[in-house]
């Protein structure tokens, strides 16, 4: 039983923070296995590269979570369409800067929330959401894109890939605590 079981809002905040941190770790472990030269590769003209997905995640998190409780999550200085454009190949330093900037804003905001904030209302593109709903919506969005990063990273790493969870064919040998030892707290 969680330590915050007496306060469901506190338990929710602890869980959503853990969830976001798990996605951050998963993405970072995948990025670390991606060859530099592969960061900007698009598999076809209608797909996005890892660099583009990271640029979008960073832009989304910075916009949604700056002044989270007091201003609309779609900030005037965000230009979403440009998150999907490149003018020059992105370096690993660029990719990691976009990643770190977005996650820093998100985690700083999450750590500042109190249980009393969970049922407050926030706006995203003019639409009202409870904080709980906005956080769940964002977690689903991030999970979607981190999944894309992991899939592409695995493709580009090829045989050098190290599994981020239980490797294929090894479920029976996996111990209950394996996710914690792999950096994923579930």
Image (cartoon, grey):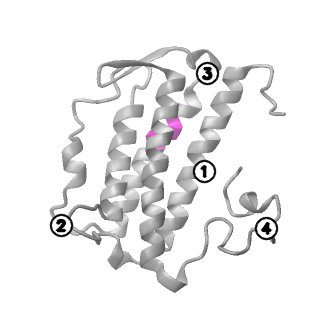
- Residue lying furthest bottom in this view? 159
The mark that comes first in sequence, 2 or 3, is: 2
| Residue shown at 64% from the left, 42% from the top | 18
The mark that comes first in sequence, 1 or 2, is: 1
Q: Is residue 25 magenta?
A: no
The mark that comes first in sequence, 2 or 4, is: 2
Would you name the residue on which mark 3 appears?
Answer: 114
Q: Is residue 106 magenta?
A: yes
Disc 2/disc 3 C-alpha distance (Å): 42 Å
Q: Secondary structure at mark 4?
A: loop
State the image coordinates of residue 118 (x, y, percent, origin top left): 57, 20
Q: Is residue 34 visible?
A: no
Q: Is residue 46 visible?
A: yes
Q: Residues within 10 Å of mark 1 (few under 14, many from 20)?
A: some
State the image coordinates of residue 54 (x, y, percent, origin top left): 37, 56
Disc 1/disc 3 C-alpha distance (Å): 21 Å
Disc 2/disc 4 C-alpha distance (Å): 43 Å
Would you name the residue on which mark 2 appears?
Answer: 88
The mark that comes first in sequence, 4 or 1, is: 1
Residue 22's label in the rendered image is 1
Q: Residues within 10 Å of mark 3 (few under 14, many from 20)?
A: few
Residue range corresponding to the magenta coloring: 104-109
Per the picture, the main secondary structure of the magenta-coloured stretch is helix
Would you name the residue on which mark 4 appears?
Answer: 174
Q: Residues within 10 Å of mark 2 (few under 14, many from 20)?
A: few
Q: Secondary structure at mark 2?
A: loop
Q: Secondary structure at mark 3?
A: loop
Q: Is residue 135 above or below residue 116?
A: below
Identify which residue, 178 or 33, lies in the foreground.
Answer: 178
């Amino acid at each position: 039983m969680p330590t915050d079981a007496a306060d469901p809002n506190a338990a929710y905040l602890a869980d959503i923070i853990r969830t976001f941190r798990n996605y951050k770790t998963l993405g970072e472990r995948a990025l670390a296995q991606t060859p530099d030269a592969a960061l900007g590769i698009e598999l076809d003209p209608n797909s996005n590269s890892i660099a583009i997905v990271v640029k979008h995640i960073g832009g989304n998190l910075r916009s949604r979570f700056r002044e989270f409780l007091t201003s609309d999550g779609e900030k005037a200085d965000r230009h979403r369409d440009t998150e999907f454009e490149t003018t020059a190949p992105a370096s690993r330093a660029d990719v990691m800067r976009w990643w770190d900037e977005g996650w820093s804003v998100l985690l700083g905001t999450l750590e500042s929330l109190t249980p009393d904030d969970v049922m407050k209302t926030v706006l995203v593109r003019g639409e009202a959401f409870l904080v709980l709903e906005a956080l769940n919506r964002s977690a689903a969005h991030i999970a979607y894109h981190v999944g894309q990063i992991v899939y592409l990273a695995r493709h580009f790493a090829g045989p050098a890939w190290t599994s981020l969870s239980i490797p294929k064919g090894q479920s029976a040998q996996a111990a209950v605590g394996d996710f914690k030892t792999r950096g994923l707290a579930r």
